[in-house]
Image: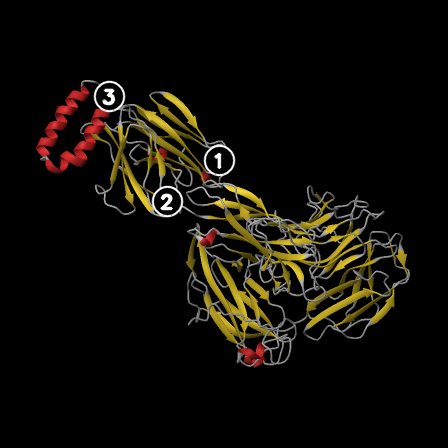
Amino acid sequence: MLLKILYLFWLEIMEKIIKPILMQRVKSYLLVLLAIGLSSWGIFAQSAPCIYTLELQDSQGDGWNGARLQVRIKGVNTDYTLINGSRQQFLLYFNNNDSLQLTYFKGKFDEEASYTLVDQENRTVFVSGSPFPLPGVVFRTKIICPTCAPPPVSQIKIEDVRAFTSRISWLGNVTNGIYQVEYDTTGFRRGKGQVVRTMLSSLTLSKLRENKSYQFYLSVICKPGDTSKVLGPYVFRTLWANDVGISKIVAPVSSCGLTSADSVKVRIRNYGGQPQSLIPFDYSVNLKPAGVNMPADGLYTGVVSKDSTKVAVFDATSNFSTPGEYLITSWTALKSDSLKTNDTTRVRIISVPSISTLPYFTNLDGKFSGWLVDTSSVNSTWAIGSPNKMVLNQAFSGNQVWTTNLSGTYKNNEKSYLLSPCFNFSSIKKDPTFSFAMQLDLESCCDAAWVELSTDGGLSWAKLGSTDSGINWYNDRAKQVWTGNGGFNGWFTASHPLPGTSTAKDVRLRMVLQSDFANSYEGIALDNFAVTQADRDFLGADVRNVSTDPCGTTADQVTFNVGNLSIAPVTAFNVAYRVNNGTVVIENVGNLSIPIAAKRAFTFRAPFNSSTPGRYTIKAWIVGENSPLNDTATNTFYTAYPLPYAENFERGAIPTNWVADNDLIVNKDRGNTTFVLSDNLFSGDVTLKAATPVFGLIAANDSLTFQYRYVNVKAGDVSATDLGVNDRMEIQVSTDCGKTFTTVTVISRANHVPSTSLRRITVKLGAYANKYVQVRFLATWGQGDYWIDIDNINVLRCTSPFSSVIAQASQSGVNDGSALVVADPYAGP
């Protein structure tokens, strides 16, 4: 060892003194003589083993699910697998001329698995196939170790980076080796950096500058004249010496029962490289200073070490007792702080109201209601406001709703919760009833909504009720959830008792939305939350028009479903309805009897006329209700849709307001990247027929645009179709709600352009100005076997100037209303 230390000392002398003045021949001669002398002591490694790195990967992060890789070294088998997680590294130790064999054994999800073998000099030895690794024996070789092998790349670590120092370490794999590190600021040329040599497997680089980027190279000297491959560069950045900040505001948090004198608790973090003390810190609420009295308050006198945090509590308290949202801002004010951008942290908390008296009701249009998004939600889209969507486009009452995305769809893989305020039922002797208005637009197969109840303040939750235990409660009997449209085309009111909640002090409710990995719709809209407890209490469950004719009738009728939340059956009460704010119709239900916790339908005898094209809103209610919080139901339907009209089939199904052949489908097949309306025409299916709903009124410059294509499919290959003399697609228009149609455009062999891409067609509708129309696509087969795809159907209109389309302004001349702008993505420049 003494000789080895002398050799290190000699290397330093050679590097700094002798090298600049001696000729290379003299230096080499001296090194040879020294090496001969040192070799006689046997202190240098002659042929060290080499170490390979095996890395197992899983693309989904859940391990290999039973797959394994068998590594055979010199006839000895060892199995490796990934139990869980996305990656794991293993070190394989070899001697020169060892045999190596890799054998892969399949698991359940091999498309997720992969692996890589890298040698000591960071060269890839073997990479598995992707996405399916080949099973069986996949690799054989004989290991040839370098005479001087560097440390394994996977084991080179950068540790404990500070302002002026940084520790680096590696796996010391060469017995009696001398490790050489060359370092300097990032970008330096090798041979020009600072060189440090050590016999240890770690090194602290010192005299660095703060907030600088450095890089280093690593190699090992096995013996004089035998140095390993140089590894690197490895890059790190030093910290600022003085850098502190507030990393988190710990308290208060969103909850019920916040008071007029709540303490604010924060975490002070040291981001820099030097220990810190005597740190000033402060806070504000809603951008107003909290009144911290420094230095008696707001001065941290303890020591905050590097990479550590300390919790501090302000003596100055704040008033959070009024329900609502509060913005708390906290910051440090260390004068020597080099980086101010991480000094400050903000958090919004909600002071949730606690309701102890009944009845409770909110239509979400007044002051803060206390409903909020649960922090345990994943990919939440819940928001409160005025909805602006195709299906969920209006509130049940007033202007605001809680909905999943105010202007679009919920997210894929969403599991989100809308959480109620707190209810204190300690003085309530009978279980109350919960009700709310809801409109749904969920993927029927795979997405769902339900309600959960907690009696311990949210520590534990249980699904509330079943299809048979409430009114309009869960339309999917198999799964006990709401899905699709919940069983109603529009708004309906759902109601369910809250079992086991009487005398409970801390009751919470939450609406749950769970979606799968694809096909998100508009989701949920909620309004008119109520919790009631009355001897006589009605529920306006839902209302509908009787006619199923999409164009309405002159003698349409209203059916009103009434729920009974009373303590006894009810009968002989009055109900009323009106259409589009027209005349109010009042009738008595007569001998219709509604049992407790049930609903029954009453059809008004007085009819209304729904045959005129347009929009109809029905409102029905119970007359003389003692607790009129949830006694009203509304429903809006169309016998003609307003313009602009657009349909892109991205909901993945035939639109409910279309009239189409039963064999038509909506899918993404045959190379389509979005959903299209499709039909396969051949000798066994000779027509495609699909009609839009009625829309209008048409203006003189309106046009219908759509895209189409004809394609052949064989063995998965898609090719353009040449039409025969009898193949054709007619675009037809009806002005009498589909009774008769007139052909306005024909696509045939004469004008069809064969292509695998969708082709855009424009049809002028000026001849139907001031009329309501329905458009039908009628394709007729002539020969062959082909698919027809139709997509992006629009009736667009340009309004100029744009200021003229502003609606719902707060007052005349104020441009603060709304405007619907539908862009045509195919119009081109």
Circle 2 SS class: loop
Q: Quadrant of the N terminus?
A: top left
Q: Amino acid at mark 3?
A: Leu
> Mark 3: few, some, or many residues within 10 Å (few <14, many ≥20)?
few
Around disc 1, counting alpha carbons within 10 Å, would you say few (fewer than 14), some (14 to 19), or many (20 or more)? many
**Label 3 belongs to which residue?**
2
- Res. 656 visible in picture: no
CA gap, disc 3 and disc 2 = 36 Å
On residue 121, the disc is none
Q: Nearer the viewer, residue 707 or 158?
A: 158
As drawn, the label of residue 63 is 1
Local crowd size for mark 2, using a 10 Å CA cut-off: few (<14), some (14–19), many (≥20): many
- Position of 754 with respect to 200 (left or right) is right
Label 2 or label 1, whichever comes before in sequence order: 1
Give me the residue at 55% from left, 78% from top.
Answer: 803
Q: CA distance from mark 2 to mark 1?
A: 35 Å
Tag 3 near tag 2, CB within 8 Å: no
Q: Nearer the viewer, residue 179 or 336?
A: 336
